Each structure stands twice: as structure tokens, then as C-alpha cells.
Amino acid sequence: MELEKENKKENTVIKARILAMQEEMAHRGIDFYFVPTADFHNSEYVGEYFKVREFLSGFTGSNGTLVLSGKQAGLWTDGRYFIQAEKELEGTGIQLYRMQEAGVPTIEEYLAQEMPEGAVLGFDGRVADAAFGKRLEEKLSAKNIAFRYGEDVADAVFGSERPALSCGRLWILPGHLCGEDCNEKLARVREKMAEEGADAFLLSKLDDIMWLYNVRGSDIACNPVAMSYTYITKDDALFFVQEEAMTQETKSYFAKHHITVKPYGALLSYLREIPRTAKVLIDMENCNYLFYKTIQEAGAATVEKANPTTRLKAVKNKTELQNMEEIYLRDSVALTKFIYWLKKNIGRMKITEVSAAAYLDNLRRQTEGFLDLSFPTIAGYKENAAMMHYEATPENCSELALEGMFLVDSGGQYLGGTTDVTRTIVLGKITDEMKEHFTAVACGMLRLTGARFLHGCTGRNLDILARELLWKKNIDYKCGTGHGIGYILNVHEGPQDIRWRLSRQAEAPIEAGMAISNEPGVYIEGSHGIRTENVIVAKNGEKNGDGQFMYFDTLTFVPIDRDGIDAAYMAKEDIDSLNAYHQAVYEKLEGRLDADERAWLKEVTAPVAYNF
Amino acid sequence: MELEKENKKENTVIKARILAMQEEMAHRGIDFYFVPTADFHNSEYVGEYFKVREFLSGFTGSNGTLVLSGKQAGLWTDGRYFIQAEKELEGTGIQLYRMQEAGVPTIEEYLAQEMPEGAVLGFDGRVADAAFGKRLEEKLSAKNIAFRYGEDVADAVFGSERPALSCGRLWILPGHLCGEDCNEKLARVREKMAEEGADAFLLSKLDDIMWLYNVRGSDIACNPVAMSYTYITKDDALFFVQEEAMTQETKSYFAKHHITVKPYGALLSYLREIPRTAKVLIDMENCNYLFYKTIQEAGAATVEKANPTTRLKAVKNKTELQNMEEIYLRDSVALTKFIYWLKKNIGRMKITEVSAAAYLDNLRRQTEGFLDLSFPTIAGYKENAAMMHYEATPENCSELALEGMFLVDSGGQYLGGTTDVTRTIVLGKITDEMKEHFTAVACGMLRLTGARFLHGCTGRNLDILARELLWKKNIDYKCGTGHGIGYILNVHEGPQDIRWRLSRQAEAPIEAGMAISNEPGVYIEGSHGIRTENVIVAKNGEKNGDGQFMYFDTLTFVPIDRDGIDAAYMAKEDIDSLNAYHQAVYEKLEGRLDADERAWLKEVTAPVAYNF
């Protein structure tokens, strides 16, 4: 083991790129430079053009910021990626900063500490959000740091290897999938603008724009969005989009709805000319720093509030919810068929993480209404599953065998909804400890599903229902329990989520119609990873003098592997919940399976016996 | 019923007082005036001198603000007091505003809505906290409202009936009860001041001052505090206190510790003279508006942060915790003896709410180390218990009988701790529904006690553990689940609490050594009230890669009435918890009881059988 450690290979490719960055920084007189993982819209997932941090550092996770000085390189990422980042950064000389761990500085704190008085901080203000830029301003003001936010240093290093900015075709969501006309949505948005005292609204968030205009694009893999902005005033709505993305049909559609289409690149000059009296609502988390400064320099006022569209979009309307119910059943069928196939064929043919994922992806592709995956399928066997967002590659993936557990987190984009589901499948013998963990995760998921709560609760109030059984074993999972989920849109959306920690982010009360993932897990580095994830929808229950009571309905109906369950670790109420869920799984899916699959499903959804 | 409503009596005394206020307001040119429930220190409970709102409105609850205009009178109070306030305000013409209910304006919103442009708002700036004053400034700025904060209008109406400002003797806490010298505490406070960038600290909060100097007073019933302020700089500590409160002994004590004693009334002129360069830390919630404005007018800067003392005080040291353990056992003995007495004598002698409370208070008084009650005993029979903070009076109290439930919430101040405990005692036949409620409350209390959680959790994360069983029945209790509790100090203290709602108040992570009450309840207006309350202390458990795990220890050991428990409503785990608790109650108390009591305790703490 010692020997191995000393022999760790140098990653010469990444080292060379970091060095090139540092040379270019020196050339431009920049002392510190940072590269976030963002596009011009602060999207969570970005197009290939924007994968600069990944290119420079070799770290492929969906969240991370590279910070460079003349001598040092550091990468900040969150708990989902600690194990993966450690591996991928090996031999690069880049230091890993584990965000939110005790004693680990934030990027702002790091810069405030490391940057000398009067030094120069460079970054590309188009890919840094305004909130972060403003925090940097505050944190670095005492040290008289110069901000050079027009610097795309990485572009020089990326050079000809850099992919082009993507430009897929924009398409109109058919009326039967919408439930609300875009002009009705605009009217509701304008109401919210008025409530916030704004007479204009610059919206950069791509999924919000798609939702607002009932359109979809394809500029980011798995995220059906088009690179665009919209600027809304009391009377006008301007839609900035790449001209090549538009067809005659979409042009007519926007014209018919009195929405003015402008070139994507025209927003910057447009903002320079807005009236000095304008009060422009911007979401500091999603508007980029360059636009924020441009509005300020134009002399207009900013109203710094959350995008009202985000909250409106999160509450699914009746049409959306009906379509989702059907789509989630279809998607559940695909995953259930996959589990059946895997259970029958493991040990009889060669199956790897990659080939298994491909088989599942193909089942989804064959599903009516399928458009795309909602994210690249995560398929992790044994200890690989301990990496929360592990991605197997054909060159580097495990072969499955008749032992241990296989975690599959996957989802699809369909005409009628976006899905996200995780099951951990037991392939053979597992330890008692693994069963204990598996059972606690399943029970936690079911306990959160069974929550009754008052309107006004946020995810911070509810998180412990899913997590408590693990905390009682002195185990935690280093991420939230759940996230909002889009409708034929991003697999992660706000404002609601289920997490326990205080964060900068405003907490959003859970409203009827919000869809949320419910995915507790156990991740034991080097051993095993377990996650069980359903999507649930908040509903209104009884309303009385004590308030509006709420509950969750489940959208996902896929068996939870009983081979991982040990009733000895369950309360009677947990056994009842699991059995009721499995009965519903059987009833919802039986008519959509062939005879062999149905017989198997009957067996694997049979009730678990009480343990007394 | 209709007739009764129409015949509601006028409360002529209160009506006359309101009218006198309105006349005095008109005389002084004041359009709107408000009277909070506060002393100069924003204490939760106040001395008789400060009971102005109670005098003017007749509402006796511990929280409420009276707002008057020339024509209208409104009283704002919180959910604990809705039922009581309705009763007490009957016939006064004062409208009740139920705080935090949907559609009910805050006082700021009400004033902003009702006050005409350019009108005059009067109040006594000594009894309004700075945070509230600042919110008013912001809310009313658009309407150009004049603030007259030097106006004690009520004093003119109160007149000769007003009691004098109380002035009890200050006494020094014996060293074996402290665990930390006051100069050590001062050093820790000065560290926190430096961290916050302050070079001075005005502390108005009475219990914090008592804690800091290891002294106690007796100026507020049940709250062993002395009217005082302290102003701390890097080198000096000034203690402002009524001269009559000091003895030769206390004078020597302060001199020995290099703390300068000044007259209570001298602070205002002292603040007028502080250096313009001073950066004075004040807690806007506890510093009064007059002092806040005075510091500003002196040209000094305010550092507006929570009192660092509050957080330091909340974490009990080893000496304090050891003393509390013993004191809670003694207090538990008193309440257990009371329950024994009540169960044996109900139906055999006349017992009223008041006489029962007197019997219990007397048992406490006989307890070694007793100083005072920690609040007036709340003793509510049947539907009276639905009023969360009901206070029976000899003239108006119920007689107990062999049926229904009797709620007793009580506590004591002892040399060694402050207690707070509630038990609901079943006196005879109760309905199945009452048993269901009683059982859910007991189980909720025990579930919260059994919580395991990570350091960083606040009460908002944990509240649902106590409340969920009620929410599953579409029932809520309109208050928090728990509050911090002082050490020979106020029965309510911050910063920690257990509640689910987002509030303006900053959330405080629960730290090892914090004592917290755990008191879920059910309150059915006109029928019954149930509350079961223990005090628990947070402790550190295992620390591992996932963080510092924590748990609670229990301080209170009093049987939970098994006549209210129905195992049919309990999970097996709840039955186990209750039985384990009762076993501990028996083991801790048996040696402190006489033979009859011991035999009875054995019986009432016997295990509940499983329901399957």
C-alpha cells in the first residue's frame, strides 16, 4: 500500500494546462483567477463550450470551482464529489477543498486570506453569478483588490480544442402538455414584478425562460433548454435567442404572442441603453456579474430578488401533474423491466456497469414519449456506488457479479415529464451491515413520504424524517435528501428542497403541486453505496383551525429490493409502509408487463412479515 | 346561546382607562400610541411598575402590545394566549389581533396602513426595543410619520395607582454554584466583542448581566434578576444598579473584581458622553430604542449583533449541570409527591385548581435549596387547560372531580438550578379521544428526547419529532415545542429553542450543555388541554468522519400518567421508550419517597404491555 501511494502517477496533461493558465495570467498581470462551473446563465449543467473547469482540472463533477494563483491551484467542490474529486485530481497538483467541512475556507475567505493588498483578481464576469461577485466585492474591499471581470483567460489555453457554443433548434411545447398559455404566465410574472416594486425583469435562468414561453431547446445535454434571455417590462417581452435556433414556426409563435425576438448577443448592448429610471428585478444567483454591473453602470436600479418564475414554475399545474403521473408509470416500467432482466441474467452473461446502464437507457428510449435522458445514468457497483455521482466509462468500469449491490440512478425526459429514480439492486450475498444500511435507507425514504405537515414547512423541517434512522447509527449522507424536479426541464430545480443545514439560500415553503425527490442514502467509502429514490408530490390535505395540513403522493412505482431488507431493523409501521408501497407497485405496473415479468413482480412485492 | 352573546357585559373600568389614554394622547398631539409588555430591558416578565399594558387592557398574558388611536384600540398577542385574551378582552372594546395567523397584520403593517401621512406616533422609547423601533422607522418612512419616543402617556393615566419601581437586594451566588469566576466570563465576553469588531458592549439583558457577574436579584417575580445595565470596554466594566440594592458585601465583591458600580439612572447621561470613535455592540432585540438613539446621537457606531453573553450563558458548565441534575431530582420528587397526594385525595376532599397549586407550591417550598417559584404555577382543569397559560384565581377557579384531566405546569428557583415541568393528571374517566391525544403527546415528547442529530442542527430541524404524531391527526399546537432554560435565572432563555416556523429570530445550533424544555401538547378549546414537559440537556455523542453526533439526556423524572396512555396508539418503540423512562423515574426517586409513595410509584411506573 505504501509503495502504491508513492508511485501515484503524475497527470502531465492537467499540469501543463494549469501551467499554461498561470503563464497567461502572468502575461495579463492577473494574480489570482477563478473558473466556476457555469455558463452565462449559471446553469447547473452546462454545454460543452463551458466545460472549462473540467478541461483545466480534469475533475468531471457537476459542481466545482478552480482557483489559481501564480503558484497554487485549488478546487472547491461539495460533499457529493469528495471521493470522486480525490481520484480525479490525483497527480495534478491541484488541492481539493471540501466545501462546508469544518476548517475549510470558502473561496471568498481563501482569496481574502491569500491575496496580497492591491492584487488583481481576474475572472470571466459572464460565467460568475452576481451574488458571488458581490460577496467577493465585500470580502475583498478591505484589501483594495482590483476586479478584472472581462477576462476569459481559459479561452486562450483552451484554444482550438474548445467546442463551439451549442445551438439546437427551439421547439414549441404542444398545447395539451402545457396547461397554461404563455401570455397567462407573463401576466402572473408581471403581477409578481409589481409586488416587488420592479418595472422590468431580466431573466437569465434557462429553464425558467423555457417554462415561461412554453418552449424547449437542446443546448445542454439532458436539459431541454435553449441559450436565451428574456427582458420583460410592463408592456413588452423581449426574447434574446440565437438566430439559428429559430424556425419559421417558432418565429410565428412568438409574433402571435406579442413577444419580440432579438439576437442572443444583443442583450449586453440593450442593457447599456435601458432607462436610468428602470427598476430591474434580477436574481443575483442567476444573473451573471457582467450584466449586473452593466445595469448599474447604465444608472438603473436593481431589485435583487429571487426570480418569481422559479416559484411559479415549481408549482405544477393540473395538466402537468396528470401527464407526470402517466410518464412516471412508464418510466417505472422501464426500470422495473431492467431490474427483472438484471436479476435473471446476472452470472449468466457478462454485464458491466456501462453495459447495464446502456440496457436501461435503451429500455427508456423504447418508451413512448421519450425525448432524452434527464441526466447521464449513474451506475455504480459495490464501492463505486459510494461515489454519489460516479460515472462509469467503457475504459474504466466494473463487471457485475453474483454478489454485492449495484446502484442505478437514472431518469428520462419525456413528452409529459422529467423523471429521476434510484434503486440499489442486490446481486448476491451482502453483509448484515449492508442490510442494516439498506433497510434504514428504505425506511427513511418511506417515512418522509408518509409525512403529514402544516403549510409553511420547508424541507429543513422535514429532512430528519428521512435521515434520523441513519443518525441513530452515527451515519450521515453528505447531501440533501431531496430536490425539486422540473417538467420536461431540468432534473434539479428550486426553490424547494429537502435538506437540514442552514444555508444562504432562502428556504421555500413546500406548496401543493411541487414535485420533490426523496433520496436518502448510505455511502461507505471503499465498501458500498446505497440510495433509494422516489419522486413525491406535495398535496393539500385537511384544512382546519390549526392550518392547512399537507401530505405527499408518490409518482415512482418501482420495487425496493427485498433482498436488501431485514425486518429485524424495521418498526412495525415501516413494514406496513413498505408492504403498502409494494402492493401499489404491483397494482400499477402489472398490466404493463409481460407474463414472466408480472410473475416475478408479484413475488418481489409480496409482503414482508413482521419481526415479532 | 345567541342571547348570552348579546348580553356580554361591558368592562367599564377598562373602557374608562382607554378613554383616558385617548384624551391624554389628544392633549399631547399624539395620533397613535403603543404600549408593549416590556421593562427598560425588554424582559419577558416584568416588575409591577411595568404592567402598564395589563393595567390599560385587562389582558394578563405575558406577551401583548396595546395599540391605540383616537378611536380604536387593538391588542396583539401570540398563539399561547388567544383563548385567554378573548375572554379577558370581552366587553372592553379592544380588538384582538392573533399574531402570525393568516391575514392578521403585524403592528408595523397595521400602523403603516392606518396612520395618515404626517401623523404623530408616540411611545415610551425606554420600553420599546431598538429592533422594533428600527422596523417601525423603515415601515413608516414613506408616510413621513413623526416619532415621539419620550412619551410615557400611560404614566399620566396610571397615576398614583402605579406601583414603585422594585428594588430588591442584590446577592452573590456562592462560588460552589458558579463554576466560573466573573472575570473569566468577562475575558470570554471581550473575546467575542473583538470578534465582532466592537470596542464596547452595552448589555441591558438582566439575566445575562446576572450570569456575567455571578449575582442574582429579586426585582421581577420568579426571575432572580436585579434592574441593572453593564457597559463593558476593553479595560473597564461598569455596572449600573439601583444604589439601594447594594450592600457592603456586594460593593466589596464588585470592587475586588475591578467592576465599577454606578447608579442605575446614570446610564443615559453616560451614553451621551461616550467617545465618537466607540463601536458599541448592542443587541437590537434587548437594547431599548432610547439608548439606541442616544448612542447614535453621541456620534458613536453601533455593532448590531446578538448579545454574546446569551450564547455563553446558554451552554451550562460542568458545575451548573451537576447542580441541575440534583435540583431536578428534588423538584421531580416534589411533583411526584403532589401527584400521589392528588390521586389519593381526589373525591375525598375539596380540591380546586388554586388549592392544588398551593399544595404543590408548598411541597416545593419545603424542598432543600428552594428560593422561589420559577413562574406562577399553571393549574388548569378540563377545558381550562386548553388555555396554554391559564392562571386560576381564588375567585374564579374550578373544583377538581373524579373525572377529566388536570394540567399542572410549574417550576422552582433553587440554589442549583431553575426547573420547569408539566404533567397532565387523569382524575377519572376520560374519552378515547383524550387518551389518543394524551398518548400522542407523551410519545412526541419521548421521540424528541430520543433524537440523535448532528451538531449544526437547530430546533427547526428537530421540532417535527415531537409534533409529527399530532400532525398525522391534523392537530397542531400553536407554540414552540421547547425553550432554553436558565440556571437560577429566567425560566425562558435563548438562543436555542425547538420550533418549526421560520422566524425573524436567528436560529441557534444546539450545543452540548444547553438545557431545553420539551413540551408538546394538545389544546382543544372548550374541552381539554394536555401537555407533558421534561427538561433535556444536549450532549456530545460519537464524533466521526460524518461529524459530531449529539443526543439528549433527561433531567426531569416524574411519572407520565399511565391512565392517559393507550398502547393501541403507540409504536413498539414508543412503548419501549416510555417503559425505559418510567424505570428510570422509579430508580431515581425511590430512595427519596416514603414507603406508601414508593409502593404507589412502583405501580404507576410498571411497564406498559405491547399492543400485539
Image (cartoon, coloured by chain):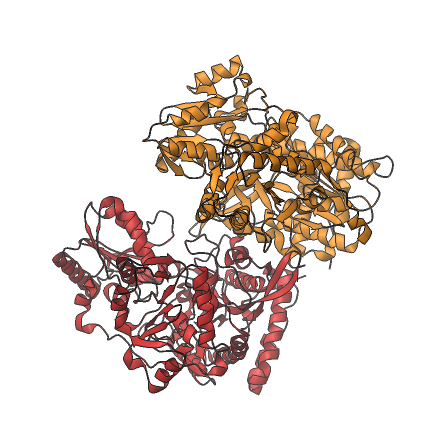
Chain colours: A red, B orange
Which quadrant is home to the C terminus of chain B?
bottom right
Q: Is residue B610 visible?
A: no
A286 and A2: which is toward the camera: A286
Residue B17, given in percent of the width and then of the height, sits at 66, 35
B183 and A173: which is toward the camera: A173
For the image, the number of numbered tags is: 0
Relative to B104, B523 lies left or right? right
User: From the viewer's perspective, is residue B357 above or below residue A475?
Assistant: above
Q: Is residue B101 visible?
A: yes
Q: Quadrant of residue A262?
A: bottom left
Relative to B99, B508 lies left or right? left
User: From the viewer's perspective, is residue B152 above or below residue B398?
Assistant: above
Q: Quadrant of residue A121?
A: bottom left
The residue positioned 38% from the left and 57% from the top of the image is A304
User: From the viewer's perspective, is residue A256 above or below residue B345?
Assistant: below
B524 and A253: which is toward the camera: A253
Q: Quadrant of residue B49?
A: top right
Residue A609, given in percent of the width and then of the height, sits at 65, 67
Which residue is the extreme one toward the right? B348
Which residue is the extreme one toward the left? A27
Residue B470, given in percent of the width and then of the height, sits at 66, 55
Residue B320, given in percent of the width and then of the height, sits at 54, 31
The residue positioned 46% from the left and 31% from the top of the image is B203
